[in-house]
Image: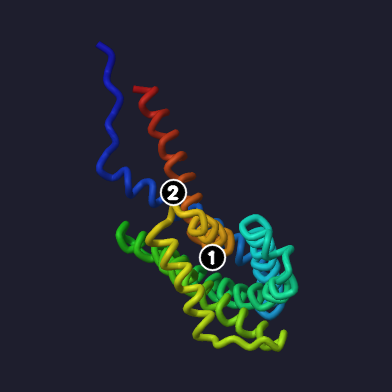
Amino acid sequence: MSPSAPSPSPRSGEAVIAIWKQYLSRLLDHYDRNRGSFISFLPKLFAFFALLNFGAYWLAITTAYPENAFGADRLNYFLLSFPVGILGAVFDTASFFITVFIARRALKTTSLASYVAHLSVDVAIAIVATFWVLFVFSFSGWLISLVLESPEALVDRTAKYGSRFEEALTDPTDGDSLRNIYFGVVMGMSAMLPSLIHLGLFVKAVGRYARRYARVADRN
């Protein structure tokens, strides 16, 4: 009778985390080697996120609400893209440095729970980003209304976007809700980057561990 393949040990999770840490450490080392001075890096990072938010806005508005992007109010939505891009970049730049700080602390932890808890801060950042997007559109819309000399109360715009958010939560399958959800996901992609990177590294670590385990099983 051929020997059965070894079953994963209870320490498999620790092995996966160890590999995950290796990948994260290499990524941070690459960042440290290529960042250069903080003074020169900061404006480049901010410009990158501003362009990313600007591009995300136009992708979202032209695909979800083409009637707004090309309709009678197109000037309003064109001007809206500038404060949206800049304020989005402010949040993303701040969250980038927070993520790097948290990642460095995570690498110093020794327990599995502590490591995962540190990296879970990215999830909190993504949640905060949702409310930041609401604020950005409320404030930007109010600002543009002043520029176009059609002033609108900030509280009214906040209530407007807040109601859309509430409708998306209560009735996500509605046509307008689906468009709002799609718009929010596209606009939130930059805030999701840290979480997506950590998830990608985790999947890569699981794959590497699985290949190691398969080789051991083949030898047995």
Q: Residue furthest top?
A: 1
Quadrant in the rendering for residue 59: bottom right
Report the residue at 48% width, 59% height from top: 177
Q: Which residue is mark 1?
A: 191
Q: Residue 219, position in %: x, y?
A: 38, 23
**Secondary structure found at label 2:** helix
Q: Could one spot residue 146 in this view of the protein?
A: yes
* Rendered position, 146 above or below 101: below
Q: Amino acid at mark 2?
A: Ile
Report the residue at 32% width, 47% height from top: 13
* Rendered position, 153 above or below 66: below
* Rendered position, 149 above or below 87: below
Q: Which residue is mark 2?
A: 19
**Secondary structure found at label 1:** helix
Q: Could one spot residue 36 in this view of the protein?
A: no
The reply to whether discs 2 and 1 touch (Cβ–Cβ < 8 Å) is no
Q: Residue 16, position in %: x, y?
A: 38, 47
Q: Residues within 10 Å of mark 2 (few under 14, many from 20)?
A: some
Q: Quadrant of the N terminus?
A: top left
